[in-house]
């Protein structure tokens, strides 16, 4: 069964020689403007910079965060709420596989800024122009980390080093990997958080 929501993303050149990524929404091409998070359920994860471990967690979530040039506090709030409430963990007492979120399990979250989530290929060369520029992204990313800490527990939120060349190590549990965009397609129907 084909639907508009299952159609691929498109890239289109505009007169400024920049590329804009589009997705179908309501039978129209619309530009993608949203914060992106790739969430992985992990048994453990760590970040190393210059051979030194700067952050590590045990069981929990590793979240790669991509900031779009147009992101706002509304996008950050959406991503924070969704990540912390995603039911990705089993409930041993009920036997339900997808029942508990990271907060209910008292697990940790490791956030890693990753501008390459907004990369696209121009020929064979990556282009990252739709990612938020570093001078704006650094304070905005710091506010995202702070928002996660205020929404959960500051001691349970870890992060990498913004702008550094990082080695991210993880043991993916499952594996379970989900992608979230802060402004989902209008054709996407989300279940309520109570289900």
Image (tube, rainbow, N blue to C red):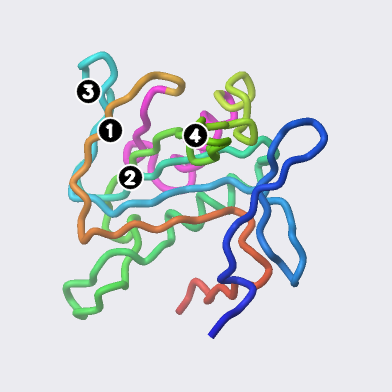
Number of marks present in the image shown? 4
Marking on residue 168 = 1
> Which dot, 4 or 3, sits closer to the camera?
4
Provide the secondary structure element on which disc 3 rests.
Answer: strand
Q: Which residue is mark 2?
A: 62
Q: Is 89 in the magenta?
A: no
Image position of 193 (left or right of 69): left
Residue picked out by circle 4: 124
- Circles 1 and 2: CB atoms closer than 8 Å: yes
Residue 95, x across and y down, in percent: 19, 79
Secondary structure mostly seen in the magenta stretch:
helix
- Mark earlier in primary sequence (2, 3): 3
The x and y percentages for residue 42 are: 24, 50
User: Which secondary structure, mark 2?
Assistant: strand
Give the label, 3 or 1, closer to the camera.
Answer: 1
Is 48 above or below relative to 147? above
Do the numbered discs 4 and 3 sit on residues whose CB atoms are within 8 Å? no
- Give the side of residue 161 with respect to residue 187, left or right: left
Q: Which residues are magenta?
A: 139-161
Query: Any magenta on residue 159?
Result: yes
Image height check: is 22 above or below 86?
A: above
Disc 1 and disc 4 in contact, CB within 8 angstroms: no
Residue located beneath label 3 in the image: 53
Query: Label 3 crowding class (10 Å Cα cut-off): few <14, some 14-19, many 20+?
Result: some
Indicate which disc, 4 or 3, sits on the residue closer to the N terminus: 3
């Amino acid at each position: 069964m084909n639907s508009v929501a299952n159609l691929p993303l498109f890239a289109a050149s505009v007169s400024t020689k920049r590329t804009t990524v589009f997705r179908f929404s309501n039978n129209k091409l619309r530009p993608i403007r949203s914060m992106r998070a790739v969430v992985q359920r992990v048994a453990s994860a760590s970040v190393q910079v210059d051979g030194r471990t700067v952050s590590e967690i045990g069981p929990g979530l590793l979240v790669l965060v991509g900031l779009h040039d147009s992101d706002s506090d509304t996008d950050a709030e959406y991503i924070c709420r969704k990540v912390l409430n995603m039911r990705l963990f089993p409930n041993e007492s009920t036997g339900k596989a997808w029942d508990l979120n990271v907060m209910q399990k008292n697990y940790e979250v490791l956030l890693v800024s990753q501008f390459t989530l907004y990369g696209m290929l121009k020929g064979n060369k990556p282009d990252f122009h739709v990612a938020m520029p570093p001078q704006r992204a650094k304070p905005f990313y710091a506010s995202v980390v702070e928002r996660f800490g205020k929404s959960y527990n500051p001691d349970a939120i870890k992060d990498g080093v913004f702008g550094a060349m990082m080695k991210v190590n993880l043991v993916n549990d499952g594996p379970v990997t989900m992608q979230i965009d802060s402004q989902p397609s209008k054709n996407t129907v989300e279940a309520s958080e109570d289900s």
